[in-house]
Amino acid sequence: MNRFPMPAKAGVAAAAALLTGVALSSCTAKEADTADGASPASEITVTATDDSCELSSTEAATGATTFVITNEGNKVTEFYVYDDGDRVMGEVENISPGLNRKLIVQLGQPGTYQTACKPGMVGDGLRGDFTVTGDAVEIDTEGKFKEAADSYKRYVNSQTDALIPATQLFVDAIKAGDIEEAKKQYPIARTYYERIEPVAESFPNDLDPRIDLREADLSEGQKWTGFHRLEKDLWLDGLQPDTNAIADQLMSDIRELDAGVKDPEWKIDSTQIAGGAQGLLDEVATSKITGEEDIFSHTDLWDFNANVQGSQTAVASVRPILDERDPELGKRVDERFAEVEKLLMRLRAGDGFVSYDTVTEPQRQELSRAIDALSKEVSQVQGVIAGQ
């Protein structure tokens, strides 16, 4: 990127047992208002359509910058902030039409960055320059911030460790033609993947769409692979001539994911952990709640439970920072997580959950409201962690 001459940048619940028993969750920043009710200068609105990406401002001062992205198009979109060489400084994916998401990005060095909206979540996106001015700002990546990132990375690694054998059982059942066993293993394997979805946007090599893309989100001519393609074969179409090949590809992609998140070069930013958790909770409350995630199997409640667990663990990783800066927020987040967990437990059946097509509309709305209330609390965490 075109730098100005400045000094160099300076450098949980059930799952939390793996993290030393801290509770989970994280979020995007709370929208802070000025005394006259206006948005702060560091908050930039982004209006995304299917053919445009309009920012309220294309410049900001060094430090934390908040982008509020609204999708006014007809396609699911993404928003990215890039440094030199397409290094991702921050991103949000799966912004459905009509929804908005918040992203806080730490831009400690002055210079020219790039922003991009990606309608359809494909290609290089609709790009534009974004100028950051001012003195270089030291972004704290040590102490509690490093501990938070390291803690959450250990959690992600533990989940991919479990994901490999669970997916292997699922794939083996498919290849043996044992449809009932494959159906049984499907939601179990997905649990480990859905727990780490708060950071799925940062997975290397576009692995998230290869593993978890839904049929409704396919672009024209795009090859459909992953869990949901196999879900359709198992519950709707029956085993197809290429089903075994798709299963083998899924297993290969899962192993690639495991290697990628264990690479020392794959790092997690403590601010982005919180944003990913809140964005995922928003997605559950506003779109997954309709049953669109597991539309063929109706195993959605397994996913919801895993998403909540993963979001809670994400918050747990930054909890020492949160408790130091805003302990009351931490208590409210805990209360909201407990409320959601209570509702989910009412829908359990044996070791799993009832089929989502048996969940009534009032039950879905109650769950949606509880997750939305949780998301609103978690949405403040990222701002606290970013020092806003």
Image: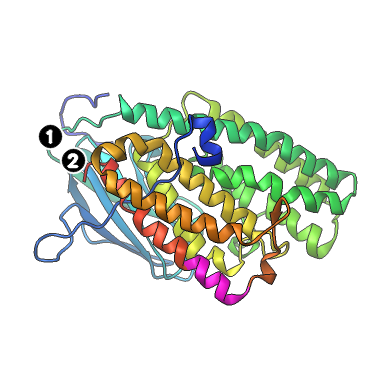
Residue 40's tag is none
Task: Identify which amino acid the numbered label 2 is placed on.
Answer: Thr
Is there any visible trace of residue 95 in the rendered image? no
Mark 1: secondary structure: loop
Under circle 2, the secondary element is loop
Look at label 1 and name its amino acid.
Asp
Q: Which residue shows up at 40% across the image and 67% down it?
A: 49
Q: Identify the image quadrant of residue 254.
A: top right
Q: In this view, does 116 lie above or below 268?
A: below
Magenta includes 363?
Answer: yes
Name which quarter of the figure residue 193 lies in. top right
Asked if residue 220 lies left or right of residue 141, the reply is right
Q: Main secondary structure of the magenta part?
A: helix
Q: In the rendered view, tell whether residue 100 sits above or below residue 176.
A: below
The location of residue 380, given as percent across then percent down, is: 30, 52
Percent coordinates x, y for residue 214 in the rendering: 63, 59
Label located before the other in sequence (1 or 2): 2
| Disc marking residue 135 | 1
Residue shown at 40% from the left, 31% from the top: 149
Q: In the current view of this chain or complex, which residue is farthest to the bottom?
A: 361
> In the figure, is residue 318 to the left or right of 350?
left
Residue position for label 2: 62
Reply above or below: 331 against 149: below
* Cα distance in 3D space between marks 1 and 2: 7 Å
Quadrant assignment for the N terminus: top left
Q: Which of 337 and 6 is in front in this view?
A: 337
- From which residue to which does the magenta span run? 360-368
Inspect the magenta stretch and tell me whether residue 230 lies in it: no
Task: Tell whether 12 sits left or right of 213.
Answer: left
